[in-house]
Amino acid sequence: MNHERSRELYDRALSVLPGGVNSSVRATQPYPFFIERGDGAHVIDADGNRYVDYVMGYGPLLFGHDLPESVQSAIQSHASAGPMYGAPTEIEVELAEFVARHVPSVEMIRFVNSGTEATVSAVRLARAYTGRDKIVVMQGGYHGAQESTLVEGDPHNPSPSTAGIPQSFADHTIPVPFNDPEAIRSVFEAHGEEIAAVLTEPILGNNGIVCPVEGYHETLRELCDDYGSLLIFDEVITGFRVGGLQCAQGKFGVTPDLTTFGKIVGGGFPVGAIGGKSNIIEHFTPSGDVFQSGTFSGHPVTMAAGLATLEYAAEHDVYDHINGLADQLRSGLTDLLEERAPQYTVVGTDSMFKVIFTRDGATERGDACGAGCRQDPNCPNFDSCPKTGADVANAETDRWERLFWQEMKDRGVFLTANQFESQFVSYAHSEEDIESTLEAYAEAL
Ligand SMILES: *Cc1c(COP(=O)(O)O)cnc(C)c1O
């Protein structure tokens, strides 16, 4: 594979963009390939190489790179009418109505411009609504590049996970291990009256894909109810992907007080949103006193792309198709692992998937979790499949990133850049793509 032009572009990029990229995860080793264009489920790079794409923009692209006619024309007509105004438009109301109609916990929604902005505003709202400062987050959870959640450590020693964040921010954040009801129970026993909210992804989607064990979300719901704290589901990655149009909260049957959205709800354009019951959401300005504002919020082109995307998904077999193909892929990967690397674990649900290079998985295979870990206590791999962010971090992350990712790339398969980020099947993927992908895995594993 020739990468001359990508190399040249990266050389130029390094002079004007820190690390040569605008989002750190894109700086793959030794240098990233630059993308020229998309084509269905594939991308073509600057040197003309073609890859089956499972990155899908890190989540937003439900349909792959060829948008349905209705989505394209919605985008084009709103862009050509004038991109934005600083005054309300009908399309924002329509997208809000659509989300409120389909997502169980949402009565009202505020649109913003990124998932990060959504979680920042949700945390501010929860603090104002409860009059409390502390938030509980999951170790290995991800809520964007924000001060209150870029925190690591344990409940007794939280610290910023990046330079540039004062310790005093981290002091208000309590990181607990995902899937550990006892850990969060004791945090509530010690600090319950100070906790504004528990903020969690329903599935850890930026940390190897870790699904909840039976009853975990119910425990969170109960603790929040008992102590008057809000439960916030960060559905930026799972929203309109896991559980289809009702999102992961519908799939798991747990109703959060607030939900953050991003990615798919903008149909491929920058977006975020905070949804929930009206009596909470109305605390945002101008109806309430929690300041929230944005020049580009509710951008008409984004709203049009998001609405046309969700309407198309409502009227076609989108979720059946992508979940079916992903099931096929996860099953095929499970079979491959049995033969080649029985200690590794296939994870994922709906259209999300990943192979985790776990170090000491059970070598006997049960049929309970044949197409991705479901946290089934009867599965022979239950004790070794990842339950927490730390379990994923303990996998062979270097081997994954430094060897395996390149091997797959050289075979024309574009995976997310490291062991932690989820991969996605889109509506544009075909059975042939799945088959060629499994062949590449068979060679690379
Ligand atoms: C992607 C993501 C974010 C951040 O969204 P941005 O649009 O990148 O700011 C927040 N939370 C979760 C769960 C995400 O997957």
Image (spheres, rainbow, N blue to C red):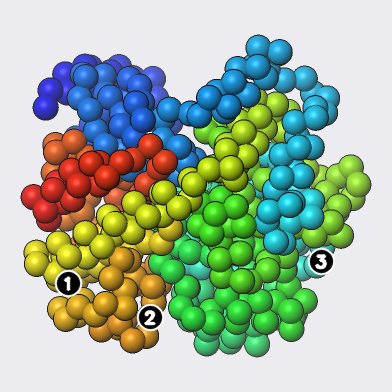
- Residue 411 location, x and y as percent? 14, 38
Dot 1 corresponds to which residue? 343
- Which residue is at 31% across, 38% downward? 53
Q: Earlier in the sequence, mark 2 or mark 1?
A: 1
Dot 3 corresponds to which residue? 131
Q: Quadrant of residue 89?
A: top right
Q: Residues within 10 Å of mark 3 (few under 14, many from 20)?
A: few
Q: Quadrant of residue 386?
A: bottom left
- Residue 231 location, x and y as percent? 67, 68
Residue type of the residue flagged with mark 2: Asp
Dot 2 corresponds to which residue? 376
The nearer-to-camera label among 2 and 1 is 2
The nearer-to-camera label among 3 and 1 is 1
Residue type of the residue flagged with mark 3: Gly
Helix, strand or loop status at disc 2: loop
Residue type of the residue flagged with mark 1: Gln
Q: Quadrant of residue 265?
A: top right
Q: Quadrant of the N terminus?
A: top left
Mark-to-mark CA distance, 2 and 1: 17 Å
Helix, strand or loop status at disc 1: loop
- Residue 376 location, x and y as percent? 38, 80
- Which residue is at 79% across, 23% downward? 86
- Residue 399 location, x and y as percent? 16, 55
- Which residue is at 91% across, 47% downward? 287
